[in-house]
Structures are given as C-alpha cells and as structure tokens.
Image (cartoon, rainbow, N blue to C red):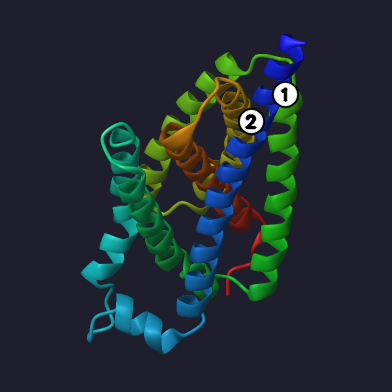
Amino acid sequence: MNDYKNNSYAADTSRVFFRSVYTYMFGALGISGILAYLVGTNLEYFSKLFMTADGDISFTFYAVIFSPFLIAIAIQWGVEKFSIGVLTLLFVAYSVLMGLSLSTIFIAYEMGDIIRTFFVSAGAFGGMAFLGYTTKIDLTKFGSLLYMVLIGMIIASVVNMFIHSGEMDFIISCIGVFVFTGLTAYQMQQLKVLSQQGLSGEQMQKLSLIGGLQLYILFINLFLSLLRILGGRD
C-alpha cells in the first residue's frame, strides 16, 4: 500500500514538473515568435532598430544577438542564488531578445519555408522528446558525445563567419540537425530522472524553468538548422 502511494505521489510530481517545463518552453516560443514576426515583417521598424542612418548594421543588432548567451549563463549560474521572480524576469528577457534576433529570418526566408520548417522541427522535436522520455537505454554517454560535437560546431561556425563558405554552412546545419535532435532525447531523459526526485516548492519551479530553457534552446537551434537546409533564401 505504501509503495502504491509513493509511486502515485512520484507520478503526480513528475506530471506537475513536466507541465511547468512545457509552460516555460511554449511561453518562450510564443514571446519569441510573436516579436520575431512583428519586427521581421515590418522593414521600416526593423531598420530603425538595427540599422544606422548610413545603412550599416547598428551596435544594437550585435547587442541583441549576443545578449541572450550572457543571460543564459546568468540563469544557469544564478539558479541557486536568485529568487524564482528574478529568474523568471531573466527568462522573459531572454525570450524577448531571442525574438528580436530571430526577426531576421522573416527577411532572409520566404514565409512558406518558415512555416513548413517550423512544423518539420516540431515533429522531429516531439518524436525525439518522446523517445528520450520512454527509452530504457541510458543516453548519458551519447549526450556527452553530442556536446563535444556541439563545441566543434560552434568553433566551425565562428570560423565560417569569416570565410563565408556556403558548403561549410550546409555541413554545419546537417550536423546541427543530428546534434540537436539527439540532445533533445538526452535532455528529456535527464529531466525525467530529475522529475522523479521528489521536487517541490521553489526548487521545482527553478529547475522546471531551467528545463524549459534547455528545451527552448534545443528547439530553436533545430529549427534554424533545418531552415538553412530546407529554406530558399529570398
């Protein structure tokens, strides 16, 4: 009888945790998506935000592009130090800045390609998330390997910013699809294990926010990798 109660409590806790994780993730996607569309489909507004009077890219653009990286580090670093209110504000700021930076895709790609790629990304993400949650295979070593590949991708992407190789960009995007789908399965398994540890109160809220942020980042990067492959630039 006690085992049944314990299992029931663990299952309820896990459901609450994942509901909170997905609330954060979909909330961030909603904020980013709406802002990206509003800014990216209004060239006049986009120019005022990100272009100088001479037609060059403004400092604001680079600040928006790189600020989310710093905020993500701050959230990870401050999960034990900051209150849930501060972490939530940082999370919303991250979503807003990501939305502004993603506005460029509405200028670079056709709307049909963006919509089609979004649904392909959602299908791939959902499938790998389900696989990661249900599989009995330990994905720890697989996840560690993928993170090493991700570091190599980041280095290659930085190099390609200077050499502007279309072939390298395509290869990086293809590898990115493999890496981000694989990491989705790995992170879901890690979150499942975490959800079964009897979390409660502010601790659960903080860790579900971190989980939502991780899944959001993986989805966005998977989407962008697929868009570079499937999307025909304007």
Q: Is residue 210 left or right of residue 183?
A: left
Q: Position of residue 83 (x, y in %)?
A: 31, 42
Asked where in the image residue 232 lies, by quadrant, the reply is bottom right
Q: Is residue 116 left or right of residue 186?
A: right
Q: Is residue 225 above or below residue 35?
A: above
Q: Considering depth in this image, is 172 or 107 the residue closer to the camera?
A: 107
Marks 2 and 1, how far apart in space?
10 Å
Label 2 or label 1, whichever comes before in sequence order: 1
Label 2 is placed on what type of residue? Ser
Element type at mark 2: helix
Disc 2 + disc 1, Cβ < 8 Å? no
Instruction: Name the kind of residue labelled 1 in the image.
Output: Ser
Q: Quadrant of residue 231?
A: bottom right
Q: Residues within 10 Å of mark 1 (few under 14, many from 20)?
A: few
Residue 24 position within the rendered picture, expressed as x and y whole percent measured from the top left: 52, 50
Q: Position of residue 230 (x, y in %)?
A: 67, 58
Residue linked to disc 2: 14
The residue depicted at 40 percent of the width and 47 percent of the height is 160
Q: Residue furthest front?
A: 1
Q: Secondary structure at mark 1?
A: helix
For image coordinates 58% across by 56% down, the residue present is 228
Residue 70 visible? The answer is yes
Camera-near label (2 vs 1) is 1
| Residue in the foreground of this view, choosing between 9 and 71 | 9
| Apparent side of residue 228 relative to residue 136 in the rendered image (left or right) | left
- Image quadrant where residue 76 sits: top left
Residue 8 is labelled as: 1
